[in-house]
Amino acid sequence: MVRSVRAWGVLALGLCLLAVSSRARAQSLSGAFDGSGSASLDIPSAKSPAALAAAAQAAQAGRDAAVPRAKQSGADLFYFTKEEAAAARKKFGMREETVNTKGLVFDSDVPAAIQAQMRADMAFMGTIQGGAGTPLHQKIFGSVNGADYLRFFETRVTGIGMDDCGSAKAVACVIPYQDPSKMWLTQNFIKFDHPQISRMMIVFHEARHTETRHGNWPHATCPTPFLDANGNDMVSIWTGATLAGEPACDVTPLGSYGSSTILLKNVQKFCANCTQKVKDDAGLYADDQMGRIIDDGARQEMLTDFNQ
Ligand SMILES: [Zn+2]
């Protein structure tokens, strides 16, 4: 999302272009005006640096506006479309995971309490030991091992900032068309009434969304109706909202919901130094997120993987 401006997208863009062109004109006029005569009132040249800069800015704004921003319903995690991811890739280019990481890099406006929570959570992830894990876990994260988890996160997420992520209930998001390798946290990160491992599930879900070479793994749309095994409406474990028709599902084990489900299932099964509470929490949230995998082949692949 583009903060509160988005709702006013088209109007704001129009105003923005007006502002850009009048500012360019004002700058050009003020630069030329020396009180010596009428020459100072000339219309700015189309080739003046200010006019060229304004034109470039307007062209970029036009390109950015060409892809409509996905509206956030707030029913579940932040959502972007395939088209938005493609536009972001055009704008930023393909990014590879960096080899050398700088650890967790926070913007200066991230509150100390949120930085401390994130550091504590990632320090916890860094302690996990559980051996090789399942084949799908190996493929995505490496071993069930703290060092592999930190490397996965830090080679993808190069900066952490504050945003509202488009919803009053959001916890974290990656917004590819703003910056494909940045993660945004919301104030809910420290108000969130869920266990630590589920918060980590969200940030690893979001980290998967930085992968431009995979189109940032956009969500799939959940079916309508969308019912659980008992015939009840599927609801978000985060927000309680009904998920039928929401872009809050996955059709591949490798996507953001799929990969974080695999992470938690492996923690539940293999973590050798986790408390029983952590393992139980991991299992509870993994089983919940497994319900978002709506492709039969993908589900079967995951179920088979979890038994290896
Ligand atoms: Zn997501």
Image: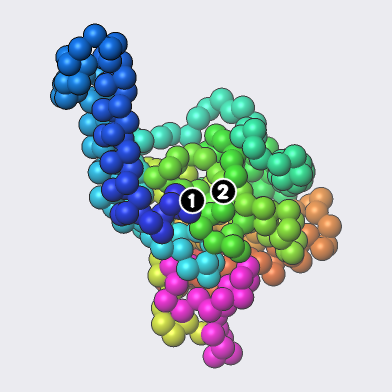
Question: Which quadrant of the view contains residue 23?
Answer: top left
Q: Nearer the viewer, residue 304 or 208?
A: 208
Q: Nearer the viewer, residue 35 or 277?
A: 35
SS majority, magenta: loop
Residue beneath the point at 48% across and 34% down: 97
Amino acid, disc 1: Arg
Question: Can you say whether 22 is above or below 196 in the image?
Answer: above
Residue beneath the point at 83% across and 62% down: 276
Question: Which quadrant of the view contains residue 42?
Answer: top left
Would residue 133 be visible to someone looking at this image?
Answer: no
The residue wearing badge 2 is: 163
Q: Nearer the viewer, residue 96 or 180?
A: 180
> Residues in magenta?
228-249
Q: Residues within 10 Å of mark 1 (few under 14, many from 20)?
A: few
Question: Can you say whether 6 is above or below 157 in the image?
Answer: below
Residue 225, x across and y down, in percent: 44, 85
Would residue 45 be visible to someone looking at this image?
Answer: yes
- Can you tell which mark lies on residue 3? 1
Dots 2, 1 in contact, CB < 8 A: yes
